[in-house]
Image: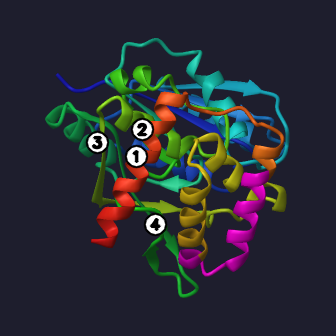
């Protein structure tokens, strides 16, 4: 029996890319049972594009919501996702959060289902992001570790999603979910044959305020000062942006100063720090 899966697509002013994304969903060799389209306070033609797809297939359901018009990473998109989730039951094998500016390979979710069915310990699965360069060629853009699934197209097994308590409405949600999955003994699986085209370069819509939140996220995940410094140095080096180090540390100390609430428990934080240290040591050996 084919695996059942649901997709939630949060969209804020995505008229330029949304049709391409939804057409790639309709082309899937393994079709989703339901797709919730969340129109998150859009002021362009996003609503009209969604309405067109409501008429193309009964799998689509639209939900209009109100929120800030700022492109803030973390809370905005996750809050929209959660509103869409309220329209769904738990009669699924895996659940997908899908951004509205992607083109998926036609067999994408067939392969994801194959991963979940064949490896029951996998809790999170996905492919890799490709973006066009100045010459129009699609190139891999994956600044994180190879075992990280980008937040743009995360798929969760039903059991894993429940055990990690769903998604956190904060910057860093797409890192803490994998850390909590590991805490609950789930694996994260990436398939480098699944090449997802990202139509809007990462971070283009984010303002300067948003770019200062990474350090805050590291604080709320209980990384501690040393791991935050190491992670920020690595990020600045990979991005070729020394300012990222300054921004991250500023955000970390601001969060500490104002005693920002943590995203994880003390026990989970201890596990996360130990896991990070093991990963650091493994890379040095």
Drawn side of residue 5 relative to residue 29, left or right: right
Q: Earlier in the sequence, mark 1 or mark 4?
A: 4
Residue located 83% across and 56% down the image: 209
Compared to residue 146, the image places residue 96 above or below, namely above
Q: Earlier in the sequence, mark 3 or mark 4?
A: 3
Secondary element type, mark 2 = helix
User: Gap in Å between the C-alphas at discs 3 and 2?
Assistant: 28 Å
Secondary element type, mark 4 = loop
Q: Earlier in the sequence, mark 2 or mark 4?
A: 4
Q: Disc 3, disc 1: CB below 8 Å?
A: no
Which quadrant holds residue 261?
top right
User: Gap in Å between the C-alphas at discs 2 and 1?
Assistant: 5 Å
User: Which residue was labeled with disc 4?
Assistant: 142
Magenta range is 237-253
Q: Position of residue 39 (x, y in %)?
A: 71, 34
Compared to residue 89, the image places residue 155 above or below, namely below
- The residue mark sitting in front, 3 or 1, is 1
User: Which residue was labeled with disc 2?
Assistant: 271
- The residue mark sitting in front, 3 or 4, is 4
User: Which residue was labeled with disc 1?
Assistant: 274
Compared to residue 117, the image places residue 193 above or below, namely below
- The residue mark sitting in front, 1 or 4, is 1
Secondary element type, mark 3 = helix
Number of residues whose C-alpha sits closer than 10 Å to that of mark 4, classed few (under 14), some (14–19) or many (20 or more):
some
Q: Quadrant of the C terminus?
A: bottom left
User: Gap in Å between the C-alphas at discs 1 and 4?
Assistant: 24 Å
Q: Is residue 239 magenta?
A: yes
Which quadrant holds residue 41?
top right
User: Gap in Å between the C-alphas at discs 3 and 4?
Assistant: 19 Å
Q: Disc 2, disc 1: CB below 8 Å?
A: yes
Drawn side of residue 74 relative to residue 177, left or right: right
């Amino acid at each position: 029996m084919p695996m059942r899966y649901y997709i939630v697509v949060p969209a804020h002013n995505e008229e330029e890319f949304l049709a391409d994304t939804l057409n790639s969903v309709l082309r899937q060799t393994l079709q989703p049972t339901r797709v919730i389209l969340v129109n998150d306070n859009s002021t362009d033609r996003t609503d009209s594009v969604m309405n067109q797809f409501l008429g193309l297939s009964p799998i689509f359901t639209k939900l209009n919501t109100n929120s800030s018009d700022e492109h803030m990473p973390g809370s905005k998109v996750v809050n929209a996702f959660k509103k869409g989730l309220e329209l769904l039951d738990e009669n699924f094998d895996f659940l997908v959060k899908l951004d509205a500016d992607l083109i998926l390979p036609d067999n994408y979710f067939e392969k994801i289902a194959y991963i979940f069915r064949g490896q029951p310990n996998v809790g999170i699965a996905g492919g890799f992001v490709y973006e066009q360069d100045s010459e129009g060629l699609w190139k891999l853009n994956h600044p994180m570790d190879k075992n990280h699934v980008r937040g743009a197209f995360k798929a969760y097994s039903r059991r894993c999603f429940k055990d990690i308590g769903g998604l956190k409405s904060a910057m860093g949600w797409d890192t803490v979910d994998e850390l909590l999955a590991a805490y609950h003994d789930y694996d994260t699986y990436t398939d480098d044959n699944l090449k997802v085209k990202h139509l809007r370069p990462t971070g283009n819509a984010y303002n300067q305020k948003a770019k200062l939140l990474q350090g805050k996220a590291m604080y709320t995940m209980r990384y501690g000062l040393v791991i935050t410094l190491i992670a920020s140095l690595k990020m600045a080096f990979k991005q070729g942006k020394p300012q990222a180090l300054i921004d991250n540390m500023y955000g970390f100390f601001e969060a500490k100063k104002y005693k920002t609430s943590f995203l994880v428990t003390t026990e989970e934080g201890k596990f996360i720090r130990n896991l990070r240290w093991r990963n650091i040591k493994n890379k040095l050996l």
